[in-house]
Image: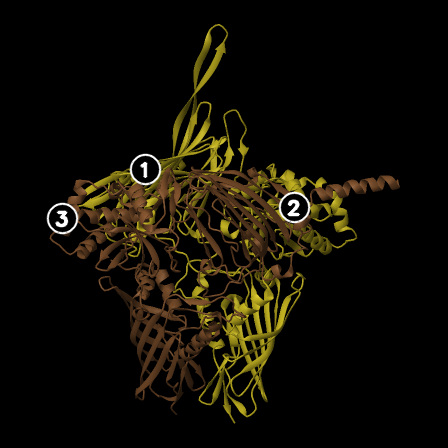
Chain colours: A yellow, B brown
Amino acid sequence: MKCNQLAIILFFTLFFLKANAQEFKLGKVSIEELQEKVNPKDTSAVAAILFKKGETRCEYSNGVGFTVITKVALRIKIYKKEGYDWANQQVNFVKVSFFKETVDFTDAITYNLVGGKIEKTKLKGEGEFEENIDKFLSKKKITMPNVKVGSVIEYEYTIKSPNVGSFKDFDFQTNIPVNYVEYTTYIPDYFSFTNRFKGFITPRVISDKKNREIVMVDKEIIVGQGTKFSERKIFYQETKTSYIVENLPALKDEVYVNNVNNYAVSLSQELSTTKFPDEPLKMISADWNSVVKSIYEFDNFGPELNKTGYFEEDMKNVIAGLSTPEEKITALLNYVKTTVKWNDYYGYSCNDGVKKAYKEKTGNIAEINLMLTAMLRYSGLTANPVLVSTRSNGIAIFPNRTAFNYVIAAVETPNGLILLDASDKFSMPNILPFRALNWMGRLIRKDGTSEEVDLMPKVVSNNTVMMNYSVDVNGQIAGKLRRQRTNHNAMIYRINTDNIKEETYLEKLENENEKIEIKDYSRANEKELNLPVSETFSFSGANLCEGIGGKIYINPLLFFSQQQNPFKQENREYPIDYGFPFLDKYSINIQIPEGYKVETLPSPAVLNMQDNLGSFKFMTNLSENTIQLVITNQINTAIISSEYYSMLKEYYQGMVAKENEKIVLTKI
Amino acid sequence: MQFKFTCFLLLFSSTLLFAQKSEYNTISIADSLKENANAIVRLNQIDITISSQRNMNIMTKRVVTVLNEKGIGEIEATEYYSKTSSVKNIEASVFDGLGIEIKKIKRKDFKDQSAVSGSTLFSDDRIIYLDYTPTQYPFTIIYESEVESSNTAFIPQWYPLSDYFVSIEKSILNVNYPDNLGFKKMESNFSNFKINKTIDSSTQLSYTATNITAQKEEDYSPVFNTIFPKVMMGLENFHLENVDGTAKTWSGFGQWYSEKILSGTTELSEETKLKMKALVGDEKDPIKKAKLIYNYVQQKSRYVNISIGIGGWKPMLAADVDRLGYGDCKALTNYTKALLNAVDVPSYNTILYGSSRKRNIEPDFVSMQGNHMILSIPNGDNYIWLECTSQDTPFGYQGTFTDDRDVLIMKPDGGEIVRTKIYQDKDNTQISKGKFSLSQTGDFLGKIIIVSEGSQYNQKAAIENFQPTDKEAHYKKYWDNINNLKIDKITFTNDKENISFTENAEISAVNYGSISGNKIMFVVNGYNQITGNVKRIRNRKNPFEIQRGYADGDEIEISLPSGFSIEFLPSNFELKTKFGEYKTEIIKKDATNLVYKRTMFLKKGLYSSKEYDEYRLFIEQISRNDNAKIILTKNI
């Protein structure tokens, strides 16, 4: 039964591929394609990929071993001048003696329609460039000749790489529409790969097996008889897999998106197991556990984590007299933060090693946080590294080693896991730098086992403002305010005010807040990271309320009111990512002038989003000459799914309208 | 025991002395130099030795104390090199606040990379730079380098003060040169700064600048190099990428450029020449011919920057551009010139600084200057200027990238400095005509036609080619005073002949008017508000400049919801100052129909620092009046 099914699928597959084979071949540009003025599915497209066809093979050659050969052929239509960038192409490759990749462009031709006839212009050497970016990386670039509005461009490039470990990512989707993409891999049964798809559309997958052979040439030198060659054949099976997607829309960036590339349709593949003849099956990575284990066994990871000699002597002073886990965590985090500075390099594996980093006082992410983990362990705590993919790296969805690019430390305590990152001077236990807040991480224990860890903050970050002000008959406002920020809000504030001179900061604060004048400014707990950071000042301003026709109109929040709905787009595909849950709270007391009374007071209001995602409260109270208001906006989760977008947009619309309602005062 | 201990101490202190640069500890820095500074240049000594027309050696010693993260950029441990220049030495060492050495950085620890930037597709140029992660602040870096080059066409300009928020303890320039190469120099903006010229002879020039305090960056300041001291230097006999050159006069420099760099680059095939002749047909008027050719170039070519060897200075052959359809500014300018030549229209390569902040070719200093090339066509006593890298710019339009500045025209018989087109303030117009209605619930529904000309055309014409999301974003920003804005329809008319761009928009917005009880309050000027972003600056030091003026006119019909009566109408307003004029007027046609008229005229000009606050108040008054509201009360 199973066998039959396979046959049917295979039959279908062959039929299908054959039916399409004619259309998607370089050199067969049609007059219709050249005549097309706009993309029929997206008239705003500046260009479109008419087809993209890629294939990756593993080929064996004597003395070299397996080489990964990737060929990609493209046909691109240019609709508008803004699409000219598509006439320039580049491919990066690695060029070092022990790991040498090559890139070649072939069949690069520009097609134009001239007087009803197809005119071809071939790319020659003058339009091809190779640039050495640095010691490791090079770039091959081409710029196509004779490109005009309406041109069709074709080219193919071939990348040869010794890296069987992971294939280059294959992108199906990009920022222009793609009509047809087909990617085929030919993989010998010696290797098995883990596939990782991204995006909202999953390609159609078709696979097939074939017998292949390798001819091995053995060289034997026999004294007196010269060199003797002998051949032997090795047979193996090869799996051909095709991934096909049609009519992909252009990828468009939106506001408040974590990283738009998380949503582009693409495929990454990574070697998970190898099985060579006469050798046992070798796991490289297949599931998270084996991925993590192979990372753990890296020279630049596990062994680095186990080194302690370099810090033991200093450690005695650092943790002397400390007994509770909290004290130790704080002391060690501060110690690493102050002694080793981050050199801006990411990575979960060490570059120069923890020892050198400690000595030179500078290191990459792995060196800093593995060192921290080792110290935490040395102090007697149960500490482990947690692999992370940063926001710019995208979300780690599928098990493979390249899914991660960052590592932090975690301490197990009776009250749960405490996450630590010593690469940022303002980070705190469970308050990680924004770059590391990206869905899930992977914790690795000493025995190599691992588990998923939620990186998104659960604790609410507050922004609390207390403001007392009075209004005079001329519409002048003078008052005092105190603003307090906690957790992530405090961290962001500390980063933004770090090294900013007070005068510069106040100038900015005055200018951004309706040009108020600020006096008696003070700040507290700037450096005391475990306490909320607060600022207090007196302010006065002439532009804060309006006197019109003998009445005074006050926007109670003054410069704190949100003027606009941040959500402007009609629809949204991507989740809304705030980074952390938060609460904005404003407690306001307004003193109205003698001889005036309140004519209109905005009515109280409450907006609740469904599923307890958030709520907005607007409370007012009038007693004699004082108006009291309490206004809160609370978002309870770091990430809101796009299904809730229209609700969220409405919520903000209601909130903005309410915040901009005016208190009206009239003369008694 | 006692003895041993002393011995150890001595040994210790002597090693300490060895690795200590006590003159560079941070305690000795004067407080005045720390004020507003992120970094302090303790010493910047540049020794330039020109040994012949084809050899220049530049030694740099730079000692910088960095006070905080923002000062890292002032280390400037960076050199460029190419096939005709080499970095002979580059090294650095780092000292802590006490002046104790904490790190030595050798050449191999510098990053060595290709220097290809954004718009360049390929270049031979390379960059070698220090990528240092500070482990503490403050710290001091001593950086030393030596670069040798066969190009003597560009002697680096000397800026004793190189940036904002950095102070200078000492800056020294020493230049040595043979007396037969015609070394020349030009000093600018020396007043108010302590700069000593210590030597000025036929073979030597030296300056020392001391104790320059850090300058704050202030909005609307003129371009940096027009307010802070600089020395330009050059040779009358120089060398550029294997070509000797002369620059005694602009005329002579132009001749050299035409003969040595440009000659032979404008050859075209007979076929192309015939094609151009056919294209212009019987047209006799040179300007009309040029228009046809320019349009042809815009359709055919695109901008790609490739700079290899002298390609950085010499245009690609016109015949190659003809075949490939791409090139950089020089290549496309030269190509257009070649095509114009084929139909007997004379035109000249023109060198300038391309930037929306106007910058002149220094007319009094004959030397290689500029970063861009356009084409000029003589038209009576004037010129028509062609931007050949753009596929959209109307014929002869200069926008804001090349307008109103001194440029160098390369005529075959010599160079000449000319001013490019000035767009007069009154001609930079934006005329809006439209209407909107307000519903009983405060919702906005409106139509408007906006016509932009002069330099305002430049900002607007690009919108036409925006992607839909960018277009939407543009209007949501332009009308950011209208909350919940929805663009219902938008069309454009780009009249390139008359250089006039028309936007025709239909928009709507809920809750435009805010409702309090039985009143609706809304801003009269819905379509064209100045939201007043002229910053307050405490103790401004620099003069301020309005680079381009403009004239806006608005005439908007407003229809009010029925069932409401007007409780308050803002009064008419007029303002006349040296910066410009502003006037608004509301005409009541009947109970529910108003007409709002607004004119705003801003003059370009350079003003003193004292006048800045006056300007800020001028804009603030406008901004406040632009926000004037009407109040309606529901009829009971």
- State whether residue B504 is above or below residue A451: below
Q: Position of residue A521 (x, y in %)?
A: 62, 72
> Which quadrant: the C terminus of chain B?
bottom left
Q: CA distance from mark 1 to mark 3?
A: 30 Å
| Dot 2 amino acid type | Lys
Report the number of numbered marks: 3
Q: Which residue is at the front of the view, A316 or B549?
A: B549
Q: Nearer the viewer, mark 1 or mark 3?
A: 3
Residue A361: image tag: 2
Q: Residue at x 61, y 49 (%)?
A: B134
Q: Nearer the viewer, mark 2 or mark 3?
A: 3
| Residue topped by disc 3 | B278
- State whether residue B627 is above or below residue B241: below
Q: Chain of mark 3?
A: B
Q: Quadrant of residue B17 in the image?
A: top right
Q: Residue at x 51, y 45 (%)?
A: B78
Near mark 1 (Cα within 10 A), the count class, few <14, some 14-19 or many ≥20, is: few
Q: CA distance from mark 2 to mark 3?
A: 72 Å
Q: Is residue A657 visible?
A: yes
- State whether residue B597 is above or below residue B421: below
> Which quadrant: the N terminus of chain B?
top right
Side of A87 where A418 appears, left or right: right
Side of A150 where B99 appears, left or right: right
Q: Residue at x 52, y 59 (%)?
A: B164
